[in-house]
Amino acid sequence: MKFSLRQKLYAVFAALLAIALVIGVQSIRRFSQLGDSIDIILRENYRSVIACQQMKEELERIDSGLLFYMLGDRQVGRSMIDLHLQRFREALRAEKSNLTLPDEPRLAGTLESDFSAYSRLLPGFYTLPAASMQYVYKESLFPLFQRIKNTADEILRLNQANMIEANDRARLKAVKARRNMILFLAGCFAIAVVFVVFSNRWILKPVCGLIASVSEI
């Protein structure tokens, strides 16, 4: 089957377009993989970091409310305690719904257990005389406050460390993807050069034969 010059040119351009398309698809696939890696970093760890930061802040507000209560401003102190207890529980629920690291469930369980013990002490604390309040605060509430805060801080550091590691992994993937793309582009360029050389002969062959025939005449 013989092809016209136009058909041969179309075939060459189609082949080159196919090579360009392959390069484009590979580039999109690599960049999508990097995008997915970054998305995983944010999805798995960022919410836990925010939840732990919020828990630490709410716990500080609860402790401030207790100090107000012991100093005699009971209405302000109780309002602060109730408000920030609720906000702490919300942040704790957010953390429990986002347990993604090996040690995180254990730490979240410890956090929940200590906070439950802390909360159970409060109703009795409100009914104590001032001198007894200070004793209970010093011997029971404040140690639990420190334990809860330290556990929340440990979960926060755990997630931050994983974010750094995931960021490093994404960076290595980017370096590898760039190296692979350079090699892939070099291979496609070589294929394109070879294809152009052979297609040039393929296109010009009938023309050369015609020129030779005319010369013989």
Image (tube, helix red, strand yellow):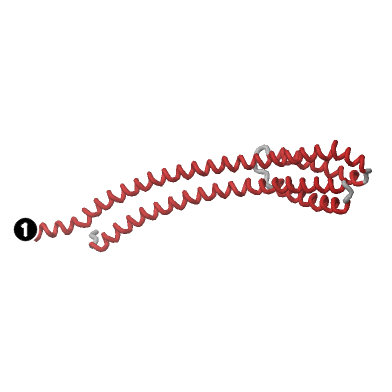
Residue 188: give x, y in percent of width and height. Answer: 34, 48
The residue positioned farthest toward the left in the image shown: 217
The number of callouts visible is 1
Q: What residue do we see at 77% from left, 39% from top?
A: 146
Quadrant of residue 206 within the rendered picture: bottom left
The answer to whether residue 197 is left or right of residue 126 is: left
Q: How crowded is mark 1: few (under 14 residues within 10 Å), some or many (20 or more)?
A: few
Of residues 17 and 206, the one nearer the viewer is 17
Residue 62: give x, y in percent of width and height. Answer: 80, 47
The answer to whether residue 121 is left or right of residue 105 is: right
Of residues 145 and 51, the one nearer the viewer is 145
* Image quadrant in which the C terminus is located: bottom left
Residue 145: give x, y in percent of width and height. Answer: 79, 41
Of residues 10 and 43, the one nearer the viewer is 43
Residue type at tag 1? Glu
37 lies above or below 8:
above
The answer to whether residue 213 is left or right of residue 42 is: left
Q: What residue do we see at 50% from left, 43% from top?
A: 171
210 lies above or below 70:
below
SS class, disc 1: helix
* Image quadrant in which the N terminus is located: bottom left
Quadrant of residue 106 within the rendered picture: top right
Residue 109: give x, y in percent of width and height. Answer: 75, 40
The answer to whether residue 52 is left or right of residue 4 is: right
Q: What residue do we see at 89% from left, 42% from top?
A: 133
3 lies above or below 188:
below
Residue under label 1, please give it: 216
